[in-house]
């Protein structure tokens, strides 16, 4: 039986629009349906229109898949990206054996980023940790910190496709320079463990404020979390989830300071990415 475990992800990370993502220890499982699949797995069988199945077929997989996933759909935590990575990874193992998964990350990134339309979520779910990507390649940012990650998740959903239509086709030179500087500062601060720089480093002029216009509660949550002492926060993906980094052991305090209009989870940065577990 071929089963892979795939982490959720939070992407964009403030100024890192389509370029920075972080894997979270909230895991989905994707497996091939065969004679060894148990009854619970078969109950979670997905059809050919599911993002995992589409990626499975695109990567050359044959047959059907089942999925178990606690990752909320349409909330900005990388559900579709994780599903695509899981489906493509099962296909690679099915074709080339159990040792192929680690060897074919570049191919998996290309397939899943093409299907997803951007690479930040799939790169994080595939590689684990904090990942920088230009859409065709990805590099992990080695982070010495082991923070709590607090995610505030409302009941409302957001369509990434619809959300992207609210963004402008061009931006000013000043805004572009602002985001380039903040994105570079964010990568450097994470790599150096410089928590004092993270608040400034997650500022953005390209997408967050425009998306907050349609999600004012998320703007309120971001302000509340940073006021409570989180190192930094950002609109996770296209929202409406908001994510924060804070010191290990401080997550519960930050979560308690957030508005009760959504529910919170305290997670950690996943360090393993997509792994074969069966």
Image (cartoon, rainbow, N blue to C red):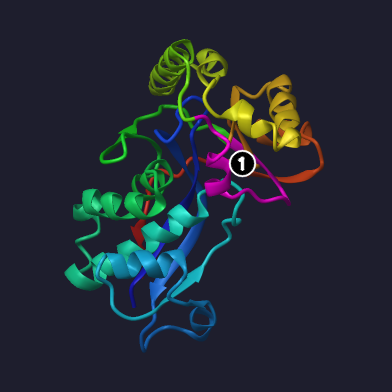
Q: Residue at x 53, y 40 (%)?
A: 164
Residue range (magenta): 149-168
Q: Residue at x 40, y 41 (%)?
A: 120
Q: Residue furthest front?
A: 169
> Residue 163 falls in which quadrant of the image?
top right
Q: Is residue 252 above or below residue 39?
A: above
Q: Residue furthest top?
A: 174
Image quarter hosting the N terminus = bottom left
The magenta stretch spans residue 194: no
Q: Residue furthest bottom?
A: 35
- Relative horizontal placement of residue 115, taking residue 74 as reference (left or right): left
Q: Is residue 240 above or below residue 250?
A: below
Residue closer to the observer: 269 or 110: 110
Q: Position of residue 21 (x, y in %)?
A: 44, 37
Q: Is residue 273 above or below residue 248?
A: below
The magenta stretch spans residue 156: yes
Q: Residue at x 43, y 57 (%)?
A: 6
Q: Position of residue 49 (x, y in %)?
A: 46, 71
Task: Name the residue carrying label 1.
Answer: 239
CA neighbours of label 1 inside 10 A, class few (<14), some (14 to 19), many (20+): many
Residue closer to the observer: 119 or 202: 119
> Residue 204 falls in which quadrant of the image?
top right
- Relative horizontal placement of residue 39, taking residue 226 as reference (left or right): left
């Amino acid at each position: 039986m071929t089963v892979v475990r795939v982490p959720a992800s939070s992407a964009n990370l403030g100024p890192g629009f389509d370029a920075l993502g972080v894997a979270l220890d909230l895991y989905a499982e994707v497996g091939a349906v065969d004679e060894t699949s148990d009854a619970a797995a078969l109950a979670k069988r997905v059809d050919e229109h599911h993002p995992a199945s589409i990626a499975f077929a695109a990567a050359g997989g044959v047959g059907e898949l089942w999925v178990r996933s606690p990752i909320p759909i349409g909330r900005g935590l990388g559900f579709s990206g994780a599903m695509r990575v899981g489906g493509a990874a099962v296909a690679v193992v099915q074709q080339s054996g159990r040792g192929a998964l680690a060897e074919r990350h570049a191919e998996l990134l290309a397939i899943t980023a093409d299907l997803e339309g951007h690479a930040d979520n799939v790169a994080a779910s595939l590689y684990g940790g904090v990942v920088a990507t230009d859409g065709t390649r990805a590099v992990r940012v080695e982070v010495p910190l082991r923070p709590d990650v607090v995610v505030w998740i409302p009941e409302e959903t957001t369509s990434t496709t619809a959300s992207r239509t609210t963004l402008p086709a061009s931006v000013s030179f000043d805004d572009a320079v602002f985001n380039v500087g903040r994105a570079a500062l964010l990568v450097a601060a994470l790599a150096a463990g410089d928590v004092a720089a993270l608040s400034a480093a997650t500022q953005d002029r390209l997408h967050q404020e425009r998306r907050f216009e349609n999600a004012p509660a998320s703007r309120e949550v971001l302000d509340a979390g940073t006021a409570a002492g989180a190192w930094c926060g950002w609109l996770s993906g296209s929202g409406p989830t908001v994510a924060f980094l804070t010191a290990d052991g401080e997550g519960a305090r930050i979560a308690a300071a957030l508005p009760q209009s959504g529910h919170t989870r305290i997670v950690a940065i996943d360090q393993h990415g997509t792994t074969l577990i069966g």
